[in-house]
Image (cartoon, rainbow, N blue to C red):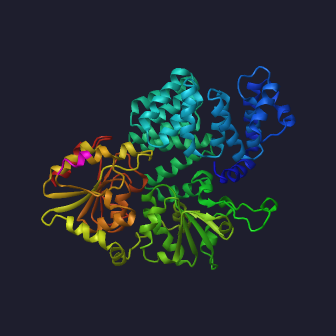
Amino acid sequence: MSSNSQLVGKFLLDRKKKLFHKSVNNTSTKNSNNKDIGFTEIVKNKQNYLSVKKQGFEYFKNSEFDFGNYVMAADEFASLNAQGSIKRIKYVLRKYPNFEAAHILYLKMLLKLNLWKGIGKVAQNAVKHHPKNEFFLNIFARHLLGVGEKHKALNYYEKCIELNPKSYNSWLALGNCYYVCRNLNKAEYCLEQSKKIYRFMTDSAFLLESNVLQAHSRYDDAMEKLKAGIKMFPLSKPLTTSLAMTNLKIGNKEEGFRLYNFIDNSNRTNFMNLVNYKFKSKVKNPQHESTKMNLIEDIEELNKNALFSKENFNILVLFEQGFGDYLHLYRYLEPLLSLGHKITALGANKSVFSLLKYANNSHLIRFSSKLENDEVEKFDYKTFTMNIPFLLGNYKNTPPPPKFNLKKLKNDKKKLNQKIKRILASKKKNIGISWKGNKEHIADISRSIDLTIFSKIFKNQNCQFFAVDKNLTKRDKRYLQKFQNVVICDELIDDWADTAVIVLQLDELLTVDTSLAHIGGTLNKPTKILIAKDPDWRWGLKSQKTEWYKSVELIRQSKKDCWQKELDGLVLR
């Protein structure tokens, strides 16, 4: 656990301390016969784990586990010492791996800190020692779903139902996982089972039902379901987000961007990961030094009055979502510059900045993947890229994608540029391809295509295909090597600037809805995008053209979850 964790915990727990005390005390009371309240007050030498352990066994007479350090860990966390509490609970679990309550406490700590990167191993270990604990199974399933192991997640959600077939939340979680895995019949079945258990729908139930309706292209019904849900749960971020995205998808841009702008931004990105809180002491006795922790959340939200005022402001613009979204929405930074504001663009996916630095006027924008603590308080306002269309208010005139200094890009990547020229087929059409997106994306199964199916386009011997993807699996590479007209480019790519250089040398692109589509459109390269039946919001529902990129043609799926017809048509072109 890094030193940053204590500060993260301090911020989060300051707002949730009462709630956490209640949950911790409930867990501790259940396992320690109501004695834990007095134990934390009388324990001596608290930093000596062995001493605390011994005192605990004396105090909790019938315990078989280290309740002394367990209770101290809970108290430390509730007292805002996240680093110390996690270090202590890890010690407890090393000595007593079957201590169920300690696993629960450890997971609750990580959940409170929103540290999902560390939850996977912790939950897996908990499941290993307690395979019939529904809470452990559910958390591990959520982790698997988040890292793209969607079918593995199904197994654990199904085990939750086996353990507790009357659990409303488990049926909804299983239904959502079936939806993500594109088994809509089972998703609907799970939804019906949840209604039998509890007839009053939660916001999660409304969201799942709306998602299933959209998967069946019933957008009017989905909108009504979302509106009904928001009427009952007006503060539900998932419902408001879905209603915003659905409005955008069906073409109601003004309403869609308006709704998106008013979503609570506290969970849109992990703010704590974007600031370096490892303070460097400027005094000899740092223990006596009080350092202010500056929070991105405390920066005032950008509003229309400030945006269009005659005064120039220092604005922090936060990127969110994936690489493609960075490229797609970068166009909205240009209008902010034209209004005279100073812009810092902040995003965790810093590899895309290697390409954006070649955009015209990029020298006027500061790109960063992490801020220093003292920088945070220097900003007048903050906003997200997805909020800017609403703030600008001009929905009819979509800003064009940025133009790039291609001469400088090619010159900086001279060796790669020359290497690609030597590989190009002189008498064939050279086509860049991508059949898959990020497996962690919630809609990846519907938008990606199995390589064995996609590969039918390789029958066209008049074309040479370039697999423009850095993250190819060994299995995919072995499969691609069977085709003489396929060039594998993964070892040629270090960053997104490399990808752009390769794309610039090709005749056209054929890709699913992923980052390569946005690179092709941004560079004005002829690009065909295979769009799922239920598309991402930016592609709309009907047109083969898009307002975002002039060079892009949308090839729409005619039957959900089936690409046969579209790929057959491409082979014949």
- Where residue 262 sits, quadrant-wise, is bottom right
Q: Is residue 480 magenta?
A: yes
Q: Quadrant of the C terminus?
A: bottom left
411 lies above or below 530: below
In this rendering, the count of numbered labels is 0
Please state the horizontal and vertical placement of residue 134, each as a whole percent of the image: 57, 27
- Where residue 167 sits, quadrant-wise, is top right
- Viewed as shown, does residue 185 lie left or right of 10? left
Please state the horizontal and vertical placement of residue 308, each as a whole percent of the image: 60, 74
- Viewed as shown, does residue 101 lie left or right of 461? right
288 lies above or below 195: below
Residue sticking out furthest to the top: 62
The residue at the point 38 percent across, 77 percent down is 405
In front here: 35 or 390?
Answer: 35
Residue range of the region highlighted in magenta in the rendering: 478-483
167 lies above or below 565: above
Q: Is residue 261 magenta?
A: no
The residue at the point 64 percent across, 79 percent down is 311
- Tell me, yes or no, if residue 365 can be seen here: yes
In front here: 445 or 263?
Answer: 445
